[in-house]
Image (tube, helix red, strand yellow):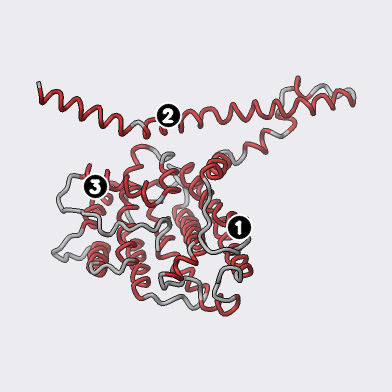
Amino acid sequence: MLLEGRGSTATAPRPEGRAEREIVIEARATTRRHARTFSAACVLLPRRLRDDVRLLYLVLRTLDDLVDDGHPAADARLTAVEAWCERRATGSASPETAILDVLAARHPLPRDVLGDFCAGMRADLEGIPPSTEAELDRYCYRVAGTVGVLMCALLGVRGDEEAARRDAVMLGIAMQRTNILRDIDEDREAGRRYLSDETVARFGAGLPGCREQLLRDQIARADRFYESGIAGIRRLRHGRAAIRVAAAMYREILREIERAGHGRDPGRAIVGRRRKAVVAVRALTPRLVTTSMRWDSFPRAVRGRGQSASGRRRSRLIAPRAFFASTRRRLEPFVGRVGRRVRWTCSAPARRSARRSSASSRLRS
């Protein structure tokens, strides 16, 4: 049960010896298809790291789908990755280990952490719910906190690496707990349960209309992990904006659960696109309001000289105009950069079609 999405990638063909370009194309498609929030945040990653992050997602997502779907090859594919983590020669490679070899040549992937991820997948194969909240935290570390540490290896760290990895684990646990709360009903229908036994004994099984106290308790726990994890994003060398946006949009799922009455109705909580856009802008400009609304930051002509009450009143009336002008100046570079990237992405099919037409014309001539 990985961070996002439910559609399976386990049956996608992955012939050995394919060109790396073909694998990258598959990784891009998988990210767009199964991880909409993560895919949107990837636009903000540096171009040279974007595809490597997608390749890592493809590996982890595929293993997760193999396990969740009960695929006959799940055990063998996990064994191959575990052998790769331990640097054991097994004589048989897998599509995942081939991609990991490519990534390990570019980044210092912590193999022991990837081994912990495989341990989490083994726990999913066993299908035994956690007994305590501590066991649930350990499970969330294995299947999601490890992803945060692997992302640190790809994006780089500034300063204290141990602290950065600890904060990345906190953020991964927060996201996985969010995932569990969002998918309570789907998991129950599939015969899975990730809530701990002690939580179920205390609040009930989490059925629709009878789970407000359970969700309040679990949301508060997730929010505490978010606070620790988001505070550590500043330690990343690259991709801070992308991770900040992904965390904010994922945390918004908790707010959507609250707005929907804490699970009053069955089904998963979905954050709409417009709401995601608002949350993304807010995440990218965390200091915008506080710095722009500080009165002494406005020009003196706006603040007025302050000799009279009427002058101060006029200044207060002018202040909103100055605030929005300041907001626009701060957002223009970001909006322009994202707009260019969105236009480039959306025009990709047209460019491919033009290249194919040009190639056909050359062959006919």
Label 3 sits on a secondary structure element that is helix
Q: Nearer the viewer, residue 148 or 41?
A: 41
Apparent side of residue 299 relative to residue 70 in the rendered image (left or right): right
Please state, as top left, top right, bottom left or bottom right, where the N terminus lies in the image: bottom left
What separation in Å lies between label 3 and label 2 (alpha carbons)?
Answer: 25 Å
Q: Could you tell me the amino acid type at mark 2? A: Arg
Q: Which residue is mark 2?
A: 340
Q: Is 57 placed above or below 298 here?
A: below
Decide: few, some or many residues near mark 3? Use Cα within 10 Å; few <14, some 14-19, many ≥20: some
Apparent side of residue 292 relative to residue 132 in the rendered image (left or right): right
Q: Is 161 placed above or below 278 here?
A: below
Q: Which residue is mark 1?
A: 260
Q: Nearer the viewer, mark 3 or mark 1?
A: 1
Residue sitting at x 58%, y 58%:
257
Q: Earlier in the sequence, mark 1 or mark 2?
A: 1
Q: Earlier in the sequence, mark 3 or mark 2?
A: 3
Q: Could you tell me the amino acid type at mark 1? A: Ala
Residue sitting at x 44%, y 68%:
187
Residue 126 position in % (x across, y down): 35, 76
